[in-house]
Image (cartoon, rainbow, N blue to C red):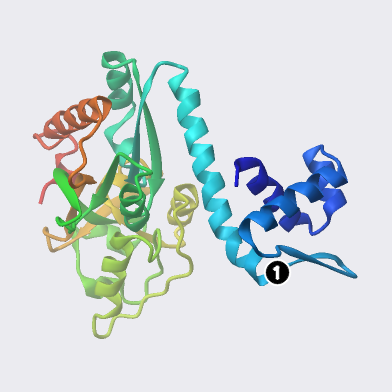
Amino acid sequence: MNKKQLEYFMETYHYRNIQVAADNLYISHQGLSRVIRSLEDELGQALFVRSNRGLEPTDFATTLLPHIQSLLDTYARIEGVQTLAGQEKSVVTVYALDHVLGYLGAEFILRFHEEHPDITLSVVDTTDELALNSLSSCHADFAIVNGPIDNTRFNCEELFYSRYCYRIHKDNPLAKKEHLTVEDFDGQRLIGKGREYNCFRKNIDKLVLAEGVNINIPIETSDEELTKELVERKLAIAVTYAFSALNHCGPNTVIRYLDDPGYGQTIYLVERCNTLPTKAGRTFKNFLLNCCLLYTSPSPRDGLLSR
């Protein structure tokens, strides 16, 4: 089978009508029918049956659908690599926890580009789990996530430590406290990125499981603008990493921590075991590690990162 057959199958499956699918593909009704028949002959199974409502996919076709979509996605990635290769640039793909690159700042990106103009950084903000899954499936060169890391599958380098924190409106009575306790959150409304993120799960588990503490979670969202607005309007307290809070505080928002200074996680740069990184990948890794060494030295950021 070839890419054209797969694309024609997807279009026919979507429209359930040969003529409509053919018009959308800019080919004839007969031409599309021939391609579908040739694919059926090759697979040895019928893909569609005619009914009063048009074409109905067979169970085999429905089972086949996600696999064909996966193949087409792979074709698209290969074509993307070819396009970038035509620009004579190397690409380093990084799947990272939301806002890690925002924490490192625009200067980090600009300085890397100035020193290595032949390398393009492709950064995808995502969850811990999806970042590691993408790394495992070779869709990424690196992942930037929190620990612990499975060292049977991955190698990792420590980037920095980030405490958990709470963004609170300055008029909230809790904002007057230097450090918070679990009991302080009784009756409070809390929001965060959601249970897909380790940070939120660990915070909510600690609070929900605490005896006598009753919290309200109206929404779980990774939309930082919405989160900032809810905090600014005194409608909620936001649970997050300190490195993320740094760039997402409104003018009336303050950051507070639990009284446990070890309440946080280390953020790691992760790569696959037994895989030799590209020259561009090694360059990015060294640049990032050197940059994070500077960030963990005493600086205005130190209060957000230190234990």
Q: Position of residue 278 (x, y in %)?
A: 25, 29
Query: Relative to residue 238, is residue 273 drawn left or right?
Result: left
For the residue pair 307 and 158, the one nearer the viewer reads as 158
Q: Between residues 106 and 125, which one lies in front from this camera angle?
A: 125
Judging depth in this view, the residue of 81 and 214 nearest the camera is 81
> According to the image, label 1 marks what residue?
58
Furthest residue in direction right, as rendered:
52
Dot 1 lies on which element? loop
174 relative position to 42: left or right: left
Q: Is residue 239 left or right of residue 290?
A: right
Residue drawn at point x = 68 percent, y = 56 percent: 41
**Percent position (x, y) of residue 52?**
90, 70
Residue 175: name its quadrant: bottom left
Q: Is residue 50 visible?
A: yes
Category of crowding for the residue at label 1, using alpha-carbon neighbours closer than 10 angstroms: few (below 14), some (14–19), many (at least 20): some
Picture coordinates of residue 16, whole percent (x, y): 79, 59
| Res 57 → quadrant | bottom right
Q: Looking at the image, which residue is at 13% across and 33% down?
A: 299
**Where does the image place residue 210, in percent across and percent down from the top left?**
24, 80
